[in-house]
Image (spheres, rainbow, N blue to C red):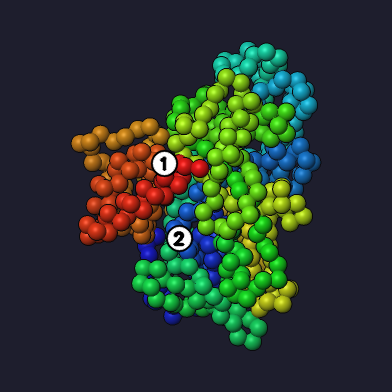
Amino acid sequence: MLTRPDPRALSGATYDLLVVGAGISGIMTALEACRRGLRPLLLERDDFGAATSHNSLRIVHGGLRYLQKADLKRHLQSTRERRWYLRHFPDLVHPLACLLPLYGKGLQRAPVLRAALAANDILSFQRNTGVATVARLDSGRVLSAAEALAACPQLEPTGLEGAALWYDGFAPNFPRLLIEALHWACAEGAQVLNHCPAIGLETAGGRVTGLRALDKRSGSEVAFHAPLVVNTSGPWADRFNAACGQTKTQVFQPRLAWNLVFDRPQLCAQALAVSDPARGGQVLFLVPWKGALAVGTGYAPWPHGPDRPAVSAELLRRFLDEVNAALPGLDLAADQVSRVYAGLLPARRDDPAELSDRPILLDHSREGGPWGLFTACEVKFTTARSLAEDLLQRLFPGHAARADEDFQRPKRLVPPDYPYFELPEAEDDAWKAPLRRAIAEEAPQSLGDLLLRRSSLGDNPARALALAEDAGKLFDWPQARLAEEIACLKKTLDLQQKT
């Protein structure tokens, strides 16, 4: 069960490894450790999946994009990992049809895409092996112009030759996916602590022996013991490494990434992939998300710290111009933005203007640090488990991983996923039952933890604030604490709505 024990009760044990940072990379590292019969302890400074992982567009991309770059290794890795999610989380990861309109320019021509989709299907011929029927992905194909317009009438008909149709995975309730993966890890023996930041390393004889952490709830410092520490804290990786005395190499060069939710209905049933060649040709996705319209992803340099990534008014204006130019007649406006999901991804070391296309894995002992300290950063959540698998094979070669068939996610009752614009009726209290269960079984320490990352009720900021007081009363808090929590939630949502 995903409960939060007193950290002091966990400090007397010795673990096989300590994992710092509970985004998707840290969670998958803990889960893969359990798959090998190891005993991990996962520490998170804030709440599980509260930072970059929370701000993704939620598409579990396969490897189609890598075919354009002839990166076969990355293609095969991505399709394998997409299948892993569809196989183990069919209730949370669904097939998503993606539509790319073709106007006969550059690579966006019917013969080119027909060949690319055929190659993609051949290379991913095992994409449905072991996957439940409801989560299986169909083959891609090229639609005629008439079929494309029937699927999405908003397309510009002039010059339209057709559209490429393919399928990827989609996790509309991604925070819930992270929580369910944590339940799985805990059922296999992992210990997890949120709101418990790691603050320093403990060593002896040039080797890691553990680390020190701060329990935010009690304000006390506590030590945990293990011969290995894996830093998966993403944008905070260099901050933690500095606290450990490791400053020789900057691991994480940040680049701002953002996705927007608009107070508008979805355009069509498919995710629409569009680009404006005049502005560089970056492909943007307009995604049907719970009845609303999500658009992403935008990128920009980020010369600041990791704590509060934000999209400026100028960046927002330019992004909206790009989206509107890519799909004439869309007319998205800043006052229609209901949610800004902003996070930081690693840029390439040799070119900070470009995102890294390879994971970061650093053994600090090779740079004068103690043996047993590693930093691991993935560039996209689809392949985070693969990075964890590679790292643990390297660190524990004698611990074979259980086969997929022998390592199955426990069956649990997953809370309902609410449509974006739906608000529970005033006299209906059924929405409270999953929240009560989450408070008892999933370690939320704040109102934001509960509404934003244990339930999809927090997807829509207006709904989250409308339900905040009633939801907060489910905790055993005095009135003053409840008022503070509501104010904190409002501030968080204001930051996610404003630029």
* Left or right for 350, reference 8: right
For label 2, the SS is loop
Q: Quadrant of residue 3?
A: bottom left
Q: Tag 1's secondary structure?
A: loop
Question: Percent position (x, y) of residue 302?
Answer: 62, 51
Three-letter code for the amino acid on which mark 2 is drawn: Asp
The circle drawn on residue 459 is: 1
Quarter the N terminus occupies? bottom left
Query: Amino acid under label 1?
Result: Asp
Residue at image location 78% in from the left, 26% down from the top: 106
Measuring from the top left, give residue 191's x and y in whole percent: 45, 67
Direction from residue 472 to residue 267 in the image, left or right:
right
Query: Which residue is depicted at the point 67% across and 13% down?
Result: 158
Give the residue at x 52% y 57%: 307
Q: Is residue 250 left or right of residue 89?
A: right
Circle 2 is placed at which residue position?
Answer: 46
Residue 186, labelled with which disc?
none
Considering every residue shown, the one lying at the far left of the view is: 427
Confirm whether residue 97 shows in the render.
no
Residue shown at 39% from the left, 34% from the top: 419
Mark 1, residues whose alpha carbon is within 10 Å: few (<14), some, or many (≥20)? Answer: many
Percent from the top left, x then y, of residue 231?
59, 66
Residue 205 visible in the shown view? yes
Q: Is residue 428 above or below residue 158?
A: below
**In the image, is residue 329 above or below residue 172?**
above
Cα gap from disc 2 to disc 1, whole angstroms: 19 Å
Give x and y (percent) for residue 482: 27, 55
User: Mark 2 or mark 1, which has the lower sequence index?
Assistant: 2
